[in-house]
Amino acid sequence: MSPQKFLDALGHLDDQYIQQAAEYNGKRRKFSRMIGTAAAACLVVLVSAAGIRMLPQRDTSPSLSTGEVYDQTESGTSSFHDGYAQTEHTGGVTIPPLDVYLGNDVAADMIAFFLYQGRCYVQYDTLDEDDGLIGEHLGTAIGLIDEWTPEDGYVDLAGSIGGDFYAVNGYDPEFMLCMKSDNGNLQLYICNNGITLQYGSELYEDRLHLSGNIDAVEFESRASWYNSENERYRLTEDCNEIIETFIHQLDAAEFLLSDQIPLEDGVTSIYETEIYHLYFKMQNGMTVHLRLYQNGYVCFDGMLDVAVQIPETEWQMLLDVLENKTAAQRVQVPDPDEVQLEKCLSDPELGGFIPNWSPDGLELNYAAVSYQIDRETGAETGTRQIMLDYDNPEKLNQHCSITISRTDEKGEYGWTGPIIDRDKLNAETIAKYFPASPDENNQELGVCYGNVIVGCWGRNLDAETVLRIFESVPAKAEENQSS
């Protein structure tokens, strides 16, 4: 479903969650089926029209550890001393507790979230690699929440996703936690609600540690982001002073609730005024994603309920650079399918068993590696399975999936279909499993190469085609068979 169609269908719902719907539904990856429980859950959106119900929110005053040294001397409200951040509130705005209760009367699903120590953590971003961000193992979310869950099911560790979660190195666990998917990706979860904020520094420095940790700054237009065009540009060093000034103003500005931003006649939502997306690529592999709106308003993508306003002079300096691209270079955004395929091909354990040939007309739909994950550390300790999925865009009923796993692998990652040894591989044998006149039913067969099984599952594939797929398995598989 395209972002526009999805938004049109949800046009009567709350603006903030409509925007999240575009992010999580219109821009989701084709291979989402294989990216793990936690990541798959992030493809649906919390768009409830019901009243807000959640666990009692614990006080989360901003007292966080950080290696930064920052002083907001002009306002006298925030300072860092000896690596400890402390803010004295004289006002500010409070983000209300997030609505995570869905009764049977709502026609929507939930964004990925889980409850921990009275706080609700919502998925913010997914990283292809964990880059040393995984900290202490803190617990295991049990999942179990869906739109049919009664209110008394919203207990600590419940959520719309399940799995082990960890602290994020360098970040306060009351603000950010993470989960590791079996495909190696790292999901970041933010407690973005029930928090009082007054100045930008309380978010961008106290919590996100923006200053001094930026590796690069990229941007794209609203149209590029909305249509998934990935027309991104990276700012050059000529913009360093402008970016530093922008961050200083970002930190010094006072927060207001996004729904309190004054709108011009005929404009019903701030999201109609969005013009750019700004990405601060951090040295630890994380991205701080900002949304820029007309008249200098800025929101953090992980906390859309609040915004700050940048003064006109500094705002125009940044805007001139973004609009004219005078100090920017076009960057190539990696295709997520290609990233996953490269991970499959380069896998040292099972990548050498991937067939080199696929039938004409079939196009790769997704590719995924599944790893063994150490529960306590989140480290990858071995490869469990590789899966490649192909479809024919011209013949909707032709499909092929290749799975590669070990003979002793059981359950979700094991091969459960019929198996033959490599020396029995011929067209006559394969025809017993993939008949010459295939019907609409799915057919499957696995070939054993020593302690590895290469499985083929498909529809409308004849024996000769399947034989050629298996015969294109690289020589490494033959070596494994003989050993």
Image (cartoon, rainbow, N blue to C red):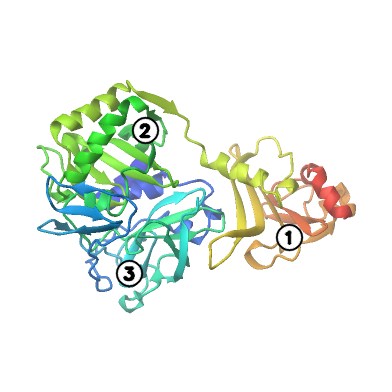
Instruction: From the top left corner, tell me how far across and down residue 77 is, in percent.
Output: 14, 53
Taking the view exactly as shown, the residue that stands out farthest to the bottom is: 152
Residue drawn at (69%, 35%), measured in percent from left and top?
Answer: 360
Pointer 1 residue? 406
Question: Which residue position holds label 3?
Answer: 104
Q: Is residue 421 left or right of residue 145?
A: right
Q: Which of disc 3 and disc 2 is earlier in sequence? A: 3
Q: Residues within 10 Å of mark 2 (few under 14, many from 20)?
A: some
Q: Nearer the viewer, residue 212 or 310?
A: 212
Q: Residue at x 52, y 49 (%)?
A: 129
Q: Amino acid at mark 1?
A: Arg
Which residue is disc 2 drawn over? Answer: 224
Label 1 crowd (10 A; few <14 / some 14-19 / many >=20): many
Q: Residue at x 32, y 79 (%)?
A: 152
Q: Quadrant of the N terminus?
A: top left
Taking the view exactly as shown, the residue that stands out farthest to the front is: 82
Q: CA distance from mark 2 to mark 3?
A: 36 Å
